[in-house]
Image: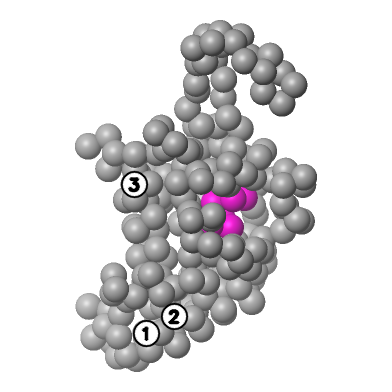
Amino acid sequence: QDTVVGGTDTTSTIIQWVMAELLNHKEKLHKVQKELSDLIGLSTVVEESHLPKLRYLDAVVKETLRLHPAVPLLLPRRPSQSCVVGGYTIPKHATVFLNVWSIQRDPSLWDNPLEFNPERFLNGTDQEWDFHGNNFQYAPFGSGRRVCAGVALAERTLMYILASLLHSFEWRLPDGEDVDMAEKLGLVLRKSQPLIAIPTPRLCGEGLYV
């Protein structure tokens, strides 16, 4: 039950961030929708079997999680022995937090780290840029044995909901301006202001929306 509740809460937050970034970058939004149209067509809805083929949407989700990790500080750790990490001595049993928000915006690790650029995740292998922390510069769900227990649920749910929303509707902002991307810090990294967007049916046939 905890896995389902935790995964659902953070997933809804990530969906809002993805939609906000795409509405601020219309060329990326159009690219996602073209990928969906080319693969699925406008006369049918998204099915689970489509998800592995949506490479650009997958890159958009990964780039959003790089800039806006749902949990900016991973759960604390306590080393069983004193150790030195990056020139810093970590005492035995000290409480250590991993600031994944800062790591994923570090200019020594990422080119143009503040730029929303999903294309950066189209290079490299799936294992290099997966959600399981195999590359320590990108670990929005943690890494190793203590990786987030809800990562599989979150990944599949995110892709299905986003693909359905972006395939089924055109989206616009009510005032035509850019989205305010200010963050509200907390255990979960939320937008400071909720996203408001207006959908317009995109598919052929009203029966597809029943």
Q: Split into 4 quadrants, where in the image is the C terminus?
A: bottom left
Residue at image coords 54%, 51%: 65
Q: Split into 4 quadrants, where in the image is the N terminus?
A: top left
The reply to whether the magenta stretch includes residue 73 is: no
Q: How far across and down, in percent of the image, does residue 9 sit?
A: 38, 43
Q: Given the image, on which type of amino acid does mark 1 rest? A: Ile
Residue at image coords 32%, 51%: 153
Q: How far across and down, in percent of the image, does residue 55 sit?
A: 48, 71
Q: Given the image, on which type of amino acid does mark 2 rest? A: Leu
* Camera-side residue of 198 and 62: 62
Q: Given the image, on which type of amino acid does mark 3 rest? A: Thr
Q: Where on the picture, by quarter, is residue 192?
A: top right
User: In whole angstroms, how far apart are the C-alphas of marks 1 and 2?
Assistant: 6 Å
Q: Which residue is mark 2?
A: 36
**Circles 3 and 2: CB atoms closer than 8 Å:** no
User: In whole angstroms, how far apart are the C-alphas of marks 3 and 2?
Assistant: 24 Å
The colour scheme applied to this rendered structure is: one colour
Q: How far across and down, in percent of the image, does residue 158 sit?
A: 39, 58
Residue at image coords 62%, 40%: 101
Numbered disc 1: secondary structure: helix
Q: Main secondary structure of the magenta part?
A: helix
Q: Which residue is mark 3?
A: 8
Range covered by the magenta-colored residues:
60-68
Any mark on residue 179, and which? none
Any mark on residue 40, and which? 1
Numbered disc 3: secondary structure: helix
